[in-house]
Image: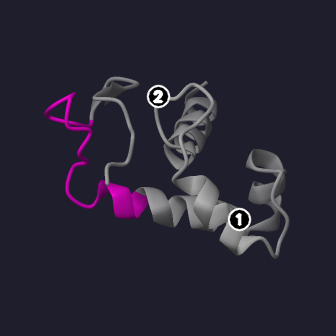
Amino acid sequence: MSCGLPQKAFGEHIHGNVYSGECEYGLRDIMKGICWKIFREDGLREKYIPEFGKGEEDRFKRWLFEMDISGEMINGCRMMLNIWRERIV
């Protein structure tokens, strides 16, 4: 399983091989942890993923690893990149 992040994002080198999609060691676990933190905090969940309610852990878990609407990466990675972009701007 790969995280779905592009090889480079916002000037950061993430993958050594664009064709493998394999994460740097530990990056996938960090991504999952951040996504679950956002889901569990009411204010963050309402801001970034309002389509999920408090008791929807199973649905959120499935959603995290589905491909986003562009088909380029998984939803969890897309969510993290959107949050990162907002932080920089």
Residue under label 1, please give it: 59
Q: Which residue occupies the foreground of this view, 43 or 74?
A: 74
Instruction: Find residue 64 and report its horizontal and vertical position in percent.
Output: 57, 55
Q: Is residue 2 above or below residue 56?
A: above
Q: Amino acid at mark 2?
A: Glu
Residue depicted at x 70% and y 73%: 57
Magenta span: 14-30
On the rendered structure, is 43 left or right of 36?
A: right
Could you classify mark 2 by the number of other residues whose Cα lies within 10 Å: few (under 14), some (14-19), or many (20 or more)?
Answer: few
Classified by dominant secondary structure, the portion drawn in magenta counts as loop
Q: Position of residue 23 (x, y in %)?
A: 26, 48
Which residue is label 2 attached to? 72
Magenta stretch containing residue 25, yes or no? yes
Instruction: Give the structural element (helix, strand or loop) at label 2.
Output: loop
Task: Check disc 1 and give the amino acid type.
Answer: Arg
Local SS, label 1: helix
Among numbered discs 1 and 2, the one appearing first in the sequence: 1
Residue at 83%, 51% in the rendered image: 51
Instruction: Choose top left, top right, bottom left or bottom right for residue 7.
Output: top left
Residue 15 numbered mark, or none: none
Q: CA distance from mark 1 to mark 2?
A: 21 Å
